[in-house]
Image (spheres, rainbow, N blue to C red):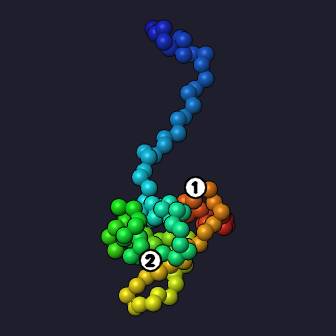
Amino acid sequence: MVSLFERLDKGRPPPAEEKIQPPHKAPTRAQKLLNWLQHWPNPTISVRDICVYGPNSLRDKKIATISAEVLVEFGWLVPQKARRYDQRVWQIARKPIVGPTVAAERADLGP
């Protein structure tokens, strides 16, 4: 015997598949650094500047250096020669992009 719900469901089109969206991820440390660099007034930045003035999650020297190297890889920072042998300095590559992401430059290159 056919139930009432099966008879009502007979004329309906099949349900559309819902796209499963991944859970909202927190921004990566490199993305946090990039967001913060948009407000940095100077043309260059050093590891010391990031550790002193940067976001709290980047106040460790090792984490700050790794995050900056990720931005170098994606073209947001350019390494500069420092005055001291133990100092790391980068020039900020300012780009006219609203809401920049770390991989925005790579997406523009295309195949």
Q: Nearer the viewer, residue 42 or 10?
A: 42
Q: Is residue 14 left or right of residue 58?
A: right
Q: Is residue 74 visible?
A: no
Q: Nearer the viewer, residue 110 or 92?
A: 92
Question: Residue 94 location, x and y as percent?
Answer: 60, 69
Q: Is residue 55 visible?
A: yes
Q: Which mark is residue 55?
A: none
Question: Residue 44 location, x and y as percent?
Answer: 52, 76
Mark 1 secondary-structure assignment: loop
Q: Residue under circle 1?
A: 99
* Disc 1: CA contacts within 10 A as few (<14), some (14-19) or many (>=20): few
At horizontal 50% and vertical 14% (from top left) the residue drawn is: 6
Amino acid type, mark 1:
Gly
Question: Residue 68 location, x and y as percent?
Answer: 45, 72
Q: Residue under circle 2?
A: 46
At horizontal 56% and vertical 27% (from top left) the residue drawn is: 15
Q: Is residue 49 left or right of residue 34?
A: left
Q: Nearer the viewer, residue 17 or 96?
A: 96
Q: Nearer the viewer, residue 89 or 41?
A: 41
Q: Is residue 62 left or right of residue 73?
A: left
Is label 2 or label 1 in front?
Answer: 2
Mark 2 secondary-structure assignment: strand
Judge whether 88 appears above or below 15 on screen. Answer: below
Number of numbered discs visible in the structure rendering: 2
Amino acid type, mark 2:
Ser
Q: Determine the CA span between mark 2 and mark 1.
A: 23 Å
Judge whether 23 appears above or below 3 on screen. Answer: below
Which quarter of the figure is the N terminus placed in? top left
